[in-house]
Amino acid sequence: MSAILKTEPLETIFNHGITDDEFEAIFDFIETQADYEAHLSATDALIDLHKLYQLRNDTTQADRFFSRLDTKSQQRLRLHCCIVNN
């Protein structure tokens, strides 16, 4: 008998009521939710959730998603934020 694995759907920015303005602020090349979700990884979803809450100035929520990232992804995100903010 083979086991059937159930996977939870990814939690994405669309589960968090992202507005059109927020979407445009975070992405400049993705046009639709379907485009966004087509190749989304769990890590990318967490990074985007972190960015969304940073944009909303909600550091508590941003930190919650940041803490769920692996160390390498956290370092990559820190580097990205330093480059973008300077």
Image: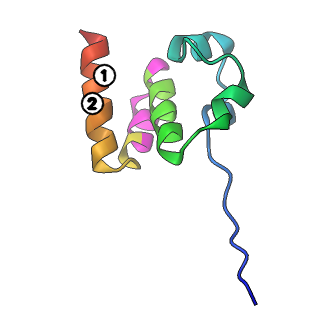
Q: Which residues are magenta?
A: 55-65
Which residue in the structure is indicated by mark 1? 81
Residue kind at label 1, given as amino acid type: Cys
Q: Position of residue 30 (x, y in %)?
A: 62, 18
14 left or right of 79 in image: right
Rendered residue at 45%/26% (across/down): 51
User: Relative to 21, does residue 63 appear above or below in the rendering?
Assistant: below
Residue labelled with disc 2:
78
Residue 27 covered by magenta stretch:
no
For the point 44% across and 42% down, which residue is it?
65
Q: Is 61 included in the stretch rendered in magenta?
A: yes
Q: Is residue 79 above or below residue 7?
A: above
Q: Secondary structure at mark 1?
A: helix
Return the residue found at the far bottom.
1
Taking the image as shown, residue 22 lies to the left or right of residue 54, namely: right
User: x%, y% of residue 40?
Assistant: 58, 39
Disc 2 versus disc 1: distance between alpha carbons?
A: 5 Å
Magenta: main secondary structure equals helix
Asked whether disc 2 touches disc 1, contact meaning CB atoms under 8 Å apart, the reply is yes
